[in-house]
Amino acid sequence: MKKMMLAIFFIAIVGIFGACSNSEETASTSETETKNSNTSNTETKAEEKKEPVAIDFWYSLGGAGGELIESMVKDFNSSQDEVVVTPTYQGDYYENHAKVLAAIASNTQPDVTMVEIASIGAFANPGAIEDLGPFVEGEDGVDVNDYIPGLMGNSYWKDTLYAVPFNRSTPLLYVNKNMLEEAGLDPAGPKTWDELEEYSRKLTIKDERWGFSAPIDIWFYEALTFENGGQILNEDGTKPLFHSPEGVEPVEFWKKMIDEGIMKMPPGEKYNAWDVAAQDFTNGKVGMIFTSTGSLNGLMAQAQGFEVGTAFLPAKKDFGVPTGGANLVMLSKSSDEEKKAAWKFMKWMTAKEQTIQFSMGTGYMPVTVSAVESDEMKELYEKTPQFKVAIDQLQYAKPRPMVPGYKELQEVIMTEIQRAIIDGSVTPEEALNTAAEKADKLLKK
């Protein structure tokens, strides 16, 4: 009986300790779960509270091009929740350049902006824009070799990458194919300076239309100088070379055709003159013009009753064109967080899918090899071969001078060329010699 009572007592004791142990384990598990739940809730709330990084993007294209940029930025913002970009149109390249400089001085600069390619050095030299090397080579980097090589000459300053191509272009010769055919001329357009002069003469109807028109602009002057075997500056950008015979002859060529009445110099300053030339072309008042490949979609849409053709700029000693347009740059005053966000945006805007969209919507060249070789672009080139001309012409392309002083020097060159052509108070040679005298000081900046 005693043994039985001891056994019952022992079992009871074990049961009590077992119950206590189970209770403690349950409580411990419950406490752990509660802690984990609280930690998880805290982390979730922290993640929910994290706001996207806001950055500003200033761009320089108006009209349909600007509308497309706004649409692309909206798509970027919708595609992810880490970065929010606010786009702002700041006028043409000249206006945006001035506004960005003023904003840097007042510490109100954007995080990303478009910069006309010849101005890259002016921003990079004083450290206003960021070295993109660490971003390109980082874990969120890109293959720089995918950018079209002919467009990269104005992306580097002193062997450092400061910009990536965005809306890039070359000048093209646009022709009214119907007008040329009616005059018994090859609708593919002239191939040489002599043919350009001949075509212009045959297309001209006095007091009614001109055969050819082009703004007296530095970009087209650079092109003619390259075609004539000349250079604007020496290789390191320290001395002017544009006042050589190879640089004088383009001005003499322009003046000869204008004086004869077979070339119209459109009135207006800078891009206003470009607009006049484009309107004269689409209205049938001129048969051929020089302008950017970025104008292709607009000219084709606005042409009144004729087919628009595109061709290489006519050659003198050889074909040759400067590349043009703008690159995307990152401002160095932005915070590290803003720079990381800026790179995410820049990478997206120049990726294959976006460069295809932008090229198709404007006429600007796609900026990556993968885009050019895509099925979408190949189909476009087959259907609308006008788009392919700028890409083919890149084999003759040269970068624009971009030493800091060239921004001011190009204004001096244009002023002197116009003085020789408009009022004839100086010869082309005298005008360019005057510009060259001022160049030494400006190129030291």
Image (cartoon, rainbow, N blue to C red):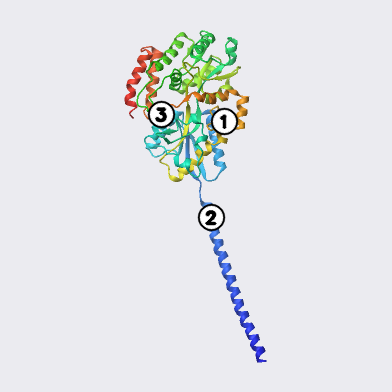
Residue that badge 1 annotates: 372
Q: For the residue marked with disc 3, what is the amino acid?
A: Met
Q: For the residue marked with disc 2, what is the amino acid?
A: Lys
- Callout 1 crowding tier (Cα within 10 Å): few <14, some 14–19, many ≥20: many
The image quadrant that residue 415 belongs to is top left
Q: CA distance from mark 1 to mark 2?
A: 45 Å
> Which of the two discs, 3 and 1, sits closer to the camera?
1
Q: For the residue marked with disc 1, what is the amino acid?
A: Val
Residue 294 percent location from the top left of the image: 52, 26
Q: Which mark is residue 402?
A: 3
Q: Considering only vertical position in the picture, is 94 above or below 337?
A: above
Residue that badge 2 annotates: 45
Q: Is label 3 in a helix, a strand or a loop? A: loop
Q: Is residue 183 left or right of residue 424?
A: right
Please say whether residue 61 is visible from this viewpoint. no
Earlier along the polypeptide chain: callout 3 or callout 2?
2
Residue 362 percent location from the top left of the image: 55, 28
Q: CA distance from mark 3 to mark 2?
A: 50 Å
Q: Is label 1 in a helix, a strand or a loop? A: helix
Q: Considering only vertical position in the picture, is 47 above or below 222?
A: below
Q: Is label 2 in a helix, a strand or a loop? A: helix
Residue 47 percent location from the top left of the image: 53, 53
Along the line of sight, the residue nearer the viewer: 141 or 268:
141
Q: CA distance from mark 3 to mark 1?
A: 27 Å
- Callout 2 crowding tier (Cα within 10 Å): few <14, some 14–19, many ≥20: few
Classify the position of the C terminus by image quarter: top left
Q: Considering only vertical position in the picture, is 50 above or below 329?
A: below
